[in-house]
Amino acid sequence: MPVEQTLSIIKPDGVQKNLIGEIYDRFEKAGLEVVAARMMQLTKEQAEGFYAVHKERPFFNDLVSYMTSGPVMVQALAGDDAIAVYRKIMGATNPAEADTGTIRADFAESIEENIVHGSDAAETAANEIAYFFTDEGVCPRTR
Ligand code: ATP
Ligand code: MG
């Protein structure tokens, strides 16, 4: 399995519910290593840029309002098959369809307010990590 990096965001509802530690625990129990982290209050421009792929979707303006409604916790995660491993522990976009025991099944309120973001492929992961972190801001383990 390839060692990969993926970009994770604990969205404003996850931070509001005080779930940062709980969600980090799930990363670590799944074998994912936090290799970069920062808390941010996204600007409208940052949220629009991050979700630019969705700009023609009917939910885009609501999504930008949601993502700017409070601070987010942004992190890069590393590990074997990290992109798929992380998407598996997140669960489906719609929490009603998410597998039991996933982050979204356990904590999300709706298809929009769904607690976490995770990259969906290697190329998007690289672009999304670079959106928030410089090369020096990512610190893979040395021991
Ligand atoms: P993310 O990209 O945040 O990890 P995802 O890849 O599971 O989630 P996408 O299809 O990329 O889902 O949608 C991005 C985000 O837009 C979703 O996480 C959710 O917050 C919001 N969203 C997606 N579909 C809808 C919808 N039908 N109605 C409202 N919001 C939606
Ligand atoms: Mg997505």
Image (cartoon, rainbow, N blue to C red):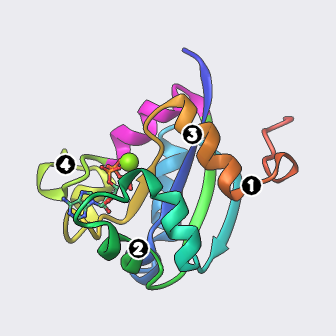
- Name which residue type carries label 4: Ala
Give the CA separation, mark 3 to mark 1: 12 Å
Find out whether residue 81 is within the magenta segment. Answer: yes
Per the image, label 1 sits on a secondary structure element best described as loop
Mark number, residue 125: 3
Q: Which residue is mark 2?
A: 64
Give the CA separation, mark 4 to mark 2: 23 Å
Residue 90 at x, y percent in the picture: 35, 49
Tell me which segment is drawn in magenta: 79-90
Residue 123 at x, y percent in the picture: 56, 31
Nearer-N-terminus badge (4/3):
4
- Name which residue type carries label 3: Ala
Q: Residues within 10 Å of mark 2 (few under 14, many from 20)?
A: many
> Which label lies toward us, 2 or 1?
2
Report if the CB atoms under discs 1 and 4 are less than 8 Å apart.
Answer: no
Residue at left offset 81%, top offset 52%: 134
**Furthest residue in direction top, as rendered:** 1
Q: Which residue is mark 4?
A: 98
Residue 36 shown left or right of residue 73 in the figure: right
Nearer-N-terminus badge (4/2):
2
Q: Which residue is mark 1?
A: 133
Q: Quadrant of residue 12?
A: bottom left
Q: Quadrant of residue 45?
A: bottom right
